[in-house]
Amino acid sequence: MRILISGICGFVGSTLAKSLLASGRGHQLYGFDNFIRPGSESNRAELKALGVKLFHADLRAASDLETLPAVDFVIDAAANPSVLAGVDGKTSSRQLVEHNLGGTINLLEYCKTHKAGFILLSTSRVYSIAPLANLKVVAVNDAFAPATDAALPHGVSAAGLDESFATTAPISLYGSTKLASEALALEYGETFGFPVFVNRCGVLAGAGQFGRADQGIFAYWINAWRQKRPLKYLGFGGHGHQVRDCLHPRDLIPLLEKQMAAPKIAATDRIANVSGGAASAMSLKQLSEWCAQRFGPHQVVSDGTMRPFDIAWIVLDSTKASRLWPWQPTLKTTAILEEIAQHADQHPGWLDLSAPL
């Protein structure tokens, strides 16, 4: 199968490309990147050596996509993945919308032209902030969990948020661009007759991720801990009890293979949560305990300052994906953390390489 990956030299795009090639299914891979993310250049030579046909193109420029070869499927792995994008003073809100939404439109127009299928890697951040922020949580073993003595909002269980959870605003500028991209992708697919799948991913993590405090938190925390850089528990009393789930992009490959080979399915089955779920969930405090065992002690400053869009607990329930395909992740969180740690040992300057300009 001929596959085009946007953002192919980023962490997710490059991991998917290498894993698809390693699957032995004979895929022919193409990809493009604008290389604005510090560190993305480091993946170019390896992908080229593996036989991936690479193009320098900016997703925001429709004309850049006009000369790309025709393919059977597009995997959209290009995005500004920070929930603070457009509001942190480092990127503009217009840039965020142009990249995450305008770029999706350009890819959909490409798919319309070539009748290519489209897979959008979306995010848990399409879910509404207010009911999540108001969710009653308790700290259990240094990690937040939904309180059992209070009624849970619709779409929430101990297993996490399912696809029926609210997606009404506010969800952040970042989340709204991804939610709008989901809607447009489904509309384009139905209108112009090509398959579309939307995978709402939990926190993606693994070796080679360009870790930053506002994105790639697992990689950032491990690399910063190893280098004894300053770390803070922000918000929620400064205890580090906030929880996220964890998924390695390699675990997406069996799902993507099934989606690309799937016959036409109902529109309601085209959106699914894809994450490590409750079994992979970990708090910052628990991550620190793992780091201390792996690298030795390091002080983390307690700072109760809240940032915009901070949520105490976000875990996705992937039951629907398991039922539809079936699919479930195989890499445990501890294995993912160790992979990141080994990469940090081998690349002690990684945070400097991948730091924002």
Image (cartoon, rainbow, N blue to C red):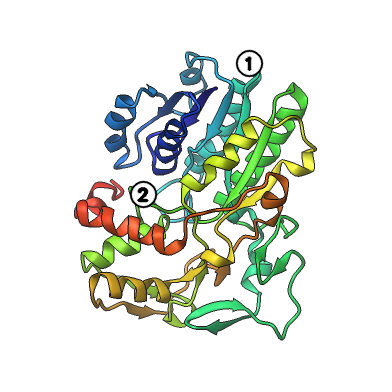
Q: Which residue lies under the disc numbered 2?
A: 209
Tell me which residue sits at (65%, 60%) in the image: 317
Quadrant of residue 271 in the image?
top right
Mark yes or no: residue 7 visible. Answer: no
The residue at the point 56 percent across, 41 percent down is 254
Tell whether 244 sits left or right of 291. Answer: right
Q: How many angstroms separate mark 1 from mark 2 (CA)? A: 33 Å
Horizontal arrangement in the rendering, residue 161 relative to residue 3 (left or right): right
Q: Which residue is drawn at 47% across and 46% down?
A: 249
Can residue 355 be seen in this snapshot? yes
Q: Please name which of the two marks, 1 or 2, marks the residue nearer to the observer.
A: 2
| Residue at x 51%, y 70% (from the top left corner) | 243
- Tag 2: residue type? Gln
| Three-letter residue code for mark 1 | Thr
Residues at marks 1 and 2 touching, judged by CB atoms closer than 8 Å: no
Query: Label 1, on which residue?
Result: 113
Q: Nearer the viewer, residue 279 or 70?
A: 279
Whole-percent x, y for residue 276 in the image: 55, 58
Which quarter shows the N terminus? top right
Q: Residues within 10 Å of mark 2 (few under 14, many from 20)?
A: many
Residue 24 location (% of width, % of height): 46, 30
Question: Closer to the N terminus: mark 1 or mark 2?
Answer: 1
User: Could you say which is closer to the camera, residue 173 or residue 152?
Assistant: 152
